[in-house]
Image (cartoon, rainbow, N blue to C red):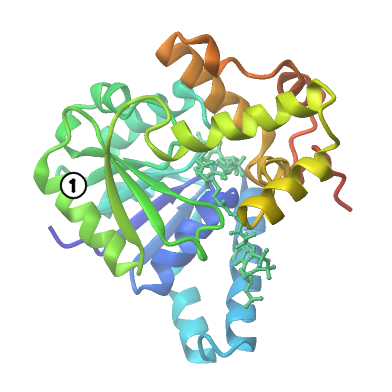
Amino acid sequence: MAVEKVMVIGAGQMGAGIAQVFAQSGFQVKLNDIAEESLQKGLATIEKHLSRNVEKGRMDEADKTNTLNNLETTTSLNEANDCDLVIEAVVENMDVKTKVFQQLDQITPKHAILASNTSSLPITDIAAVTERPEQVIGMHFMNPVPVMKLVEVIRAIQTSDETYQTIAETAEKLNKTAVEVNDYPGFAANRVLMPMINEAVYAVFEGVAEPEAIDEVMKLGMNHPMGPLQLADFIGLDTCLYIMEVLHEGFGDSKYRPCPLLRKYVNAGWLGKKSGRGFYVYE
Ligand code: CAA
Ligand code: NAD
């Protein structure tokens, strides 16, 4: 199937990045959010990154104009009625996501593929609330989307080979590399990454070292581009906590228990970079 028209749902840090890479690659993109303010913020972020690309000689003014022309914003989900592919990137909450998928199942053309950018929630369960489970799939982009090469493509137990093939080819058109994984809690990326981040929070909780020291150890000692606590702030501490909860519940193994300090920060509204405070303070 040829994908031409795409809707991205949720204009937060992931949705805006996903919309940008699709529009840059020549797809017609509608960026949707329940909040007009989020759409304006998302669009401003995209414009800023495109201008940076022009400044750095990675694209010319005409590419920037074409990208922006490929992009429209809307608060109406009904506008997905002519889309070939929808990528959902709303908050990491199963109830919110299943409601969006049930609505999309009614609105979108019968051939459309419904994808989720979820970090950890079961694609199989999301597919099961629709009447087209074989056309539901995980298309998990990494943050920051315009920079990171990986798209983790998650097959629900119901996903058809044709759907997988279309999504893998679409990822290639975005100049990304698709890696196929099966649907288990946290998939592959967060099954491996999040326990490391959670362990770093435990190290702070138990007084092993200050956050700066732990991050320095991992940056200088392991060549990680960001330390785990800086990365947790970058991802969002709420998202990190939700993912640990999915791993803990999904495997029933105490090795995945979220650190109480992580929960305390989230309850305090210290969500990391996006809220101005997490393990670090942001101006
Ligand atoms: N959007 C677009 N471009 C961005 C960006 C953003 N949010 N942030 C940085 N960039 C670009 C910058 O423009 C810069 O390029 P130029 O200077 O040439 O314009 C380039 O990336 C490098 O940025 P910086 O020099 O500012 O900083 P850096 O060298 O430290 O790189 C980084 C920034 C790419 C984010 C790097 O620190 C990094 O790779 N960090 C780790 C990111 C990571 O692990 N991501 C995965 C998170 S887990 C996930 O996404 C899954 C999940 O479900 C939670
Ligand atoms: P975010 O909080 O930055 O953005 C979420 C956006 O969704 C907000 O603008 C909000 O207004 C909007 N929204 C909420 N409910 C909606 C609805 N019903 N319809 C339309 N819009 C709605 O979150 P984010 O960090 O961009 O994460 C989005 C998704 O991507 C989550 O599932 C998350 O787990 C996943 N993800 C996050 C990262 C990361 O590093 N932050 C990486 C990969 C995947």
188 lies left or right of 2 = right
How far across and down, in percent of the image, does residue 13 sit?
60, 51
Is 149 situated above or below 238?
below
Q: Does 249 sit above or below residue 216?
A: above
Measuring from the top left, give residue 185's x and y in whole percent: 39, 24
- Mark 1 is on which residue type? Tyr
- Viewer-side residue, 224 vs 276: 224
| Residue 61, horizontal then vertical, whole percent | 54, 90
Q: In which quarter of the image is ligand 1?
A: bottom right
Image: 209 above or below 228: above
Residue at 67 percent of width and 42 percent of height:
228
SS state under label 1: helix
Query: Could you tell me if residue 239 is visible in this image?
Result: no
Q: Which residue is drawn at 15% across and 52% down?
A: 165
Q: Quadrant of the N terminus?
A: bottom left
Q: Where is residue 84 in the image (x, y as percent from the top left)?
A: 24, 54
Whether label 1 lies within 8 Å of ligand 2 gets the answer no
Question: What residue is shown with label 1?
Answer: 164
In the picture, measured across the screen, residue 1 lies left or right of residue 64, that is left
